[in-house]
Amino acid sequence: MKNLAIDTSSSICSVAILEDDKLIDEINLDDGRTHSENLMPLINEILKRNSLDIKNIEMLSCSCGPGSFTGIRIGVATIKPIAEVLNIKVASVTSLEILARNIENAETIVSLIDARNNQVYCGIFDKEYNKKQEYLADDINNVIEVLKKYENITVVGNGAILHKELLTNCLKSVDFAKENEQSAANCGKIGYKKFLKNELYNADTIVPIYLRKSQAERLKK
């Protein structure tokens, strides 16, 4: 099954093609331009260099957040019409799940994404990448209090880099990932897992996952 995956929820615009959950090709671009300028050209490029047509795609995997509000909207808005035209379903993948896949053989995986002003998005997973509890969007100090009940933690993401000293000082046993970037390849692998569980969505039901309101909305309120 040809699986087209995209991730625009971080600063990197990432696209990948997989056969089921096996990576065929991936392009990652972080050139300072907006994802709206890069995404469709990258999709066309990756299809062309693998001698594929968009009609060959049988499922879609999309990172729906949390992360960059603008990036998430661009990704979801791009995936929806493709899914509708091709009449195929979409795996809605969180950026926290994508980061967790960077880690292997860890008892507890913690994905941390910087949300600015000492806030983070947090996902806590077991070694099979299943959620241990609901996602958090909170002050890093409050998140650390939650993490204290877990042992043998491996932390991944830009939030882990930003708050490394604090995490090291406050947690008894914590390791840090070497790879902290999100990727469409991981998005596609998780998406295929959701396909096997029959957890796919129609085009009109895919929505962004924000976890909290945007800065503009908070200031307005």
Image (tube, grey):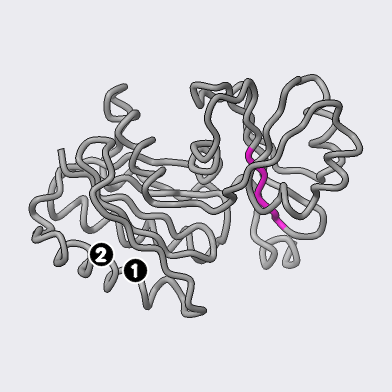
Q: Give yes or no for residue 113 being in the magenta stretch.
A: yes
Q: Residues within 10 Å of mark 1 (few under 14, many from 20)?
A: many
Q: Which residue is mark 2?
A: 43
User: Which range is magenta?
Assistant: 111-115
Is residue 67 shown left or right of residue 34?
right
Cα distance between the residues tagged 1 and 2: 6 Å
Q: Residue at x 42, y 48 (%)?
A: 207
The quadrant in which the C terminus is found is bottom right
Q: Which residue is mark 1?
A: 39
Considering every residue shown, the one lying at the far right of the view is 169
Q: Position of residue 4 (x, y in %)?
A: 25, 50
Q: Residue at x 36, y 45 (%)?
A: 206
Q: In which quarter of the view is residue 168 placed?
A: top right
Q: Residues within 10 Å of mark 2 (few under 14, many from 20)?
A: many
Q: Are marks 1 and 2 in contact (CB under 8 Å)?
A: yes
Amino acid on which disc 1 is placed: Leu
